[in-house]
Each structure stands twice: as C-alpha cells, then as structure tokens.
Image (cartoon, rainbow, N blue to C red):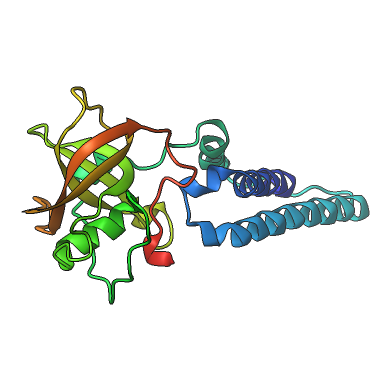
Amino acid sequence: MNRQAQAAVLLLLGAALLHAGATDLYLRYVKTGLRPLLLASGAVLIATAVATAWYERRRDRRSGSHEHPGPRVSWLLLLPLLALILSAPPALGSYSALRTGTALQKPYAYGPLPAGDPVPLSVVEYASRAAYDHGRSLHGRPVRVTGFLALDRSGAPYLVRMALNCCAADAQPVKIALTGDLPPVLSPDAWLEVTGTYTPRLTRDPVNDGPIPSLKVTSTRPVQAPRDPYDETWNN
C-alpha cells in the first residue's frame, strides 16, 4: 500500500463518516450530541486524503521516482470500512439485553409528571420511578412506554431500551417486566408501545442482581423502531 492508496482509504473513510453523520446511520454507533464531531472528523479525513494525494503527486513529478509499497497486510484496513459501507449492523437488541445486567441507576431527584393521561415516559424514567421512588409519582396515573421486547429462557417478557453514555460500545439495558394484558404472540426485538399502570412487583436481574420493576399492561401497539434506538435520558 503506497501513499496514493493510503490517501484513497482515507478518502473513503472520510466519505463514510460524512454519510453516517448526514443520515440517521450514526445513531447506531454514537449518541446524538456527537454528530458535529463525526462530521468534522469526516471532513478532516477527506482534507488529509486530498492533501496527501496532492503532495505525493507533486513529489513524484519532481523526483521522478516512486516509493516502494508498504506491507500487503495493511490492505486489511479496508475490511472495517467495507463493513461500514456495505452492511451497517443493527442497533443492539434482545440478545445483548439478556446477557447484560440492568444498568438502572437511582436519579438525584424526580421531577413532576406532565399533565394528561397516559403519561409518556421512557423506559429509564418509568423504571427509576418504580424501583427507587416506589412508584409514589406513578400511583393512579396510566403511563405509555416504548421499547423492544426481550424474552428470557422461561418466556417471561421484558420491555427494554439500551441506554448509553457515549456510544454503542458502552450501551447497557434497562428492563421492565411486563404483566397483565399481553399479546398472544410475542416476538423478540419487536418494538411495542405499551400502556399500563404501576405495580409494586420487583424482581432481580439474574445477571447482576439489579432491580427490574414491573408494569401492568392494559394495551399494546406495535410500532416502528424509533429514529434513535438508544435511550439517552442520562445525557439530558
């Protein structure tokens, strides 16, 4: 791999980053707030590639000689780039959620719930109020929560959202056990909008013994996966 080839790889990588940042593809990898940095990184890589190609071409014209190519193993750098371009991986789902302990954390405070019923809450918001506030603010208020389904080995259903701090590499699940009026057929990784009420039932995650609160379901509705599949409540 000579300098011209290296410049071509940089150009392709920069273009891939710009494409991911200009579309919703980047949300499968990093949190929303990192989009400007991703776009800037792509622009810098493209500028570096153009400068490298221009410099090498000018040097070759002056010296009339060509550099010896580097080791062929360096072409393996193209593999992750091709993977990004040809087949972007899906967001983390039930397989990862069931093999990772809940990341539910106790918040510093609980704000008032918005007016209107049912109250729209994220998985993290409902779970933290149910587990650590003992449902005080949830009593008598129907809630609406959206997440994807995960079924454990016994077939018990959970509504899950992967919460992240920075990127998909540190994403961890927050789980809500579902009881009550459930659909007859439950498909792992299917996204559901669940309406229900608080129930004091609390179980422990078999992976890390963390708390998993429950939600008594009154109705469900299948929905499309959201634009941002990860829960960024902790980043707000």
The one nearer the camera, 197 or 187, is 197
The one nearer the camera, 67 or 166, is 166
> Looking at the figure, which quarter contains the C terminus?
bottom left
In the image, is residue 210 above or below residue 18?
A: below
The one nearer the camera, 230 or 41, is 230
Where in the figure is residue 48, as x and y percent of width and height? Answer: 73, 57
In the rendered view, does 196 fall on the left or right side of 163?
left
Q: Tell me if I can see residue 74 in this picture.
A: no
Q: Which residue is rendered at x = 13% and y = 65% of the image?
A: 134
Where in the figure is residue 137, as x and y percent of width and height? Answer: 22, 65
> Looking at the figure, which quarter contains the N terminus?
top right
Where in the figure is residue 77, as x and y percent of width and height? Answer: 54, 44
In the image, is residue 148 above or below residue 163?
A: above
In the rendered view, does 34 fall on the left or right side of 172?
right
The one nearer the camera, 82 or 88, is 88
Residue placed furthest toward the top: 185
Q: Which residue is rendered at x = 86% and y = 50% of the image?
A: 57
